[in-house]
Amino acid sequence: MRTLRAVVAGAAATMLLAGCGNGFGSSQPSSSSGPLKVMIGSSGPAETNAVQAAADRWSKSSGTKVEVIAAQNLDQQVGQGFAGGNPPDVFYLDPTRLQQYAKGGSLYAYGSQLPASTVGDFYPALRQTYTYKGQLTCAPKDLDTHELVINTDMWSAAGLTQADYPKTWDDLTRVATRLTTAQHVGLAFTGDHNTAGTFMLEAGGWFLNANNTAVTADTPQNLAALQYLLTNIGKKVFARAKSIDAQWGGQAFGTGKAAMDVEGGWIIGAMRTDYPNVHWTAVQMPTGPGGRGTTVFSNCWGIAAKSSNKSQAVSLVEALVSPAEQKAFQNAFGATPSRSSLAAWSVQANPNKAAFNAGVAYARGPVPVPGFTSVLSDFDTGLENMVSGTVTPEQILQNMQRNGEQVLKSQ
């Protein structure tokens, strides 16, 4: 799986960062003769080598050395660096952590130091995701959205054509039913809050309001989304990946246990590497009762407030988000550029990117509220229990409403 999942996987140790640092944006850029330390959550050698190559190109022109470190557990290792007073200068930052880290004084807000043309080229959804107290805190690195991936051999075998690509939820149920056989289910997905959230957006709902100031979990729209998923799981035309012996939706899809999957753009690399003989395509998610909707996943380049190399760090990040380097990253390991001006190029270079890139225009980023990850984790457990029949959709949404409101009150 792609970088995004590699970063999210290390969430358990993030509390180490809270309260660390010498003030959010509290000092001007400084310089040091030592090498820049860049810590990444890499998806594999291709990504590590690509970041190192980009860093080497910048080093050659700047004269500043860069050490790229592929973390085993990004959040834990970055947290240990902050706790010990020696954090990496630059690091991958998950948007679900941004406000927590910024509130704790761990981040250096450098967005205003980037060229206006660069900032304006970032997708609006990403600029919003990485803005804290009115300041662009870190530069978006890449992105992916949830879309529908289809096994084209299974699709054809079921007598379906491109004209049958689902446009609505009713269409999705219809084709999933048609695709379901004794050997595979019509549609599988990982089944956590990310998947549920995509359907909630399509129903016109979400976890929080537009300004992330009020919890909106217990609503008719969100209930409609969960009931839709539960109904189709009950019909056995949808399935959570773990229920069909797969660790995630992409594995269920790649191993032929599902004819369709709701997945992010990281599926491109997974299919190329792990399931090269599977023929597939990606289309945009069907429209729900609330319209189009999907979730956007991304990372940004964080800079530590305690870095003694701030000026070089900003210069390096500016190079890393340049068109040339973002193209190099997509070519090397599939990362979709965060710059809107590269959208057409991205699809030309890899046609499978089309559906994932199209979703950015109406996508919504992860919940950025500090402490809300525990609410989402509890919601994930609730989703499992909902499928097993021990709780109702109404109950898990009511529980999320209560838990979420408690978190917001603590801010």
Image (cartoon, rainbow, N blue to C red):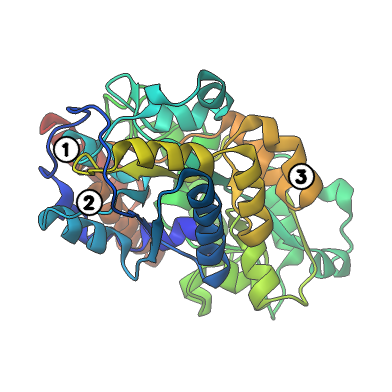
* As drawn, 50 above or below 33: below
Q: Is residue 282 visible?
A: yes
**What residue is at 48 percent from the left and 34 percent from the top?**
364
Asked if 175 appears above or below 337 in the picture, the reply is: below
Amino acid type of disc 1?
A: Val
- N-term mark: 1 or 3: 3
Observer-nearest of 172 and 311: 311
- The answer to whether the residues at label 1 and label 2 have Cβ atoms under 8 Å apart is yes
Residue holding disc 1: 407
Mark 3 — residue?
Answer: 347
Q: Which residue is mark 2?
A: 374
For label 2, the SS is helix
Snapshot quadrant of residue 219: top left
Give the image location of residue 221, x and y in percent.
45, 33
How far, Cα to Cα, is label 3 from label 2?
36 Å
Apparent side of residue 301 relative to residue 187 in the rendered image (left or right): left
Say which label, 3 or 2, has the lower sequence index. 3
97 or 149: nearer the viewer: 97
